[in-house]
Amino acid sequence: MKFFQYLLISITLFICAIITAQENVYNIKDSIYIRRLITEAGKYNSRNIDSAERDARNALLLSQKIGNINLEIHSRSALAIILAQKKGKENLEEARYHFTANLPLSRSIGDSTASFSFVNNMSNVYVSMKNYPKALKYALQSIELGKQLKKDKEAKLGISYNTLGNIYWDANLRDSALFSYKKAKYHFKKIQSPYEYYIDGTIGEVYLLQENYDEGYVYLKYAYDKLKEADNNFEFTRISNLLGTLLLKMEDANRAKQYYEEALKIGNKKDYKNLQIKSFFGLAKVFYIEKKMDSAGFYIDKALKHIKALEPIEDKVEILELKADILSGKGKAKEALGYYNLSKNLNDSLAELKNIPETTNILVQHQNKTNEEKVSTMQRILAKKNKWIIVITVLLLFLGGLSYFFIKKYRKRLDVSHKNKEVLEISLQSEKDNNAYINRKLVAATANLALKTDLLSQIHELLGQIKNQPAQNLTKEINETQTQIKIQKNMDTMWKEFFTHFEEVHPEFLKDLKSRYAITQHDLKICAFLKMNLSNKEICQLMNINPTTVRVNIHRIKKKLKIPKESSVVEFFSVN
């Protein structure tokens, strides 16, 4: 009897072992299949994004089914990134949900690197949702998490600062964006990461938008050369288009054409729709400038064919305006008017949508919202207490009266706070109007300086004419020169007025420079222009000196101010 019992137990254990082994085999197979789905989902840039989303969802369902937390984290991350790329309110909300769900999962397995990635991605999602307070909050959190990492610290900090730069870029705060991008470049450069070249391209794009074409060209050309070596087709195509745009701004249509054609060649081969459109548009502008209307029309029609694929409304407006200009150049005024109206309507809708406050206002609004939530919470607590007051003893009634006294006192404080807020708003508006007035005076003073420069040029020309003429014919030219010199006598007053208005906008700036550094009056003029964020070209025109002299003067000023090599004078003045 005992023999049969032992035999039965042995058979049962054997069957259980077979079942367990079979389950392990199935789990291994499922894990391999899930990893393959995640890999395929990660190729969303080179395949149909809806198919990539389907693979990511299947991977998430299977990973939850077999209870593999690591695979679930990777599946959620892949799905969230795809949804964020697709954009749209529902997709962004779901992406935010998956990144949020991944945070506790990554912390439960002690994966600090994954936690960093999810916090950083949350920031990017909130940027797409135009929720800047939360985007800033998560971006700053990711920087702090990056500093605590032992592995890949520099790379993660580079990613965080790049995200912060994107927030400032989207909020149209380009100086702050530029500073953050340069911090990102610094961290990527320390580890010789190829991401440095992508950041160089972005920095070049910021300089392009700021119309600082010399600096922009340096960064974009560096990125172009490095990406060509790295064989990164997408970024290389993007940078080629940007170089074409920059060179068009510098009135070098021939070289711009070469870069656009190179970008289009790769864009057609790889089917980069958005980049193809930018190349078509760029070539259309080149041919329009060269007065080759048929070629310009050919490329602008190519761009219009895929205009719906473009996301930035500004790009659509520019394409429609160029189409109208080309039609007008061909003498087709009626058709041109139709495209002008389309671009105007689109531009009007863009103006309504563009309501991006500055970072300071964003943070103030965020703080106000937080304060309102605190007040609301306090009011809910007091409401609950009032319910208890109705049903309990006289003692609690007394406490209720006391609570009422404090509430009344608190409301009085709120009224005072609201009044102070109104006074502050009026004061801020007055200060804003005053600043606008001062800025107008500063612009006028700068214009007077430009006039002075023009007068000096005229005097110089007249003296040149006198030099080359016989003595008996000098009377007329000398009289003209004396007239110019009489006018010139008032120009020093213009400089004084310029400095007076400048000090109203930037008090103590010049005084501080003179007290701390051995700096000349000539240097002070250049420092003032740099503080006003004028380009080298504009400084040349105002001071009637050539670009080389400006660069030499700026270099000399940099030495006197002991500014580090990696920083610029403009950056130094922005923080001092």
Image (cartoon, helix red, strand yellow):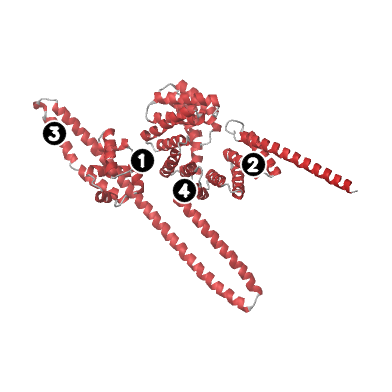
Residue at far bottom of view:
394
Q: Earlier in the sequence, mark 4 or mark 1?
A: 4
Observer able to see residue 269: yes
Q: CA distance from mark 1 to mark 3?
A: 52 Å
Q: Secondary structure at mark 2?
A: helix
**Residue at the left extreme, as displayed:** 472
Marking on residue 566: 1
List x then y, in percent, for residue 351. Answer: 48, 42
Residue 425 placement: quadrant: bottom left
User: Which structural element holds mark 1?
Assistant: loop
Identify the mark nearer the N-term, 4 or 2: 2
Q: Nearer the viewer, residue 415 or 216?
A: 216
At 38% from the left and 26% from the top, the residue drawn is: 252
The residue tagged 2 is 71
Q: Residues within 10 Å of mark 4 (few under 14, many from 20)?
A: some
Q: Which residue is mark 4?
A: 357
Q: Nearer the viewer, residue 482 or 259?
A: 259
Identity, as a three-letter code, of the amino acid under mark 1? Glu
- Identify the residue position indicated by label 3 in the image: 479
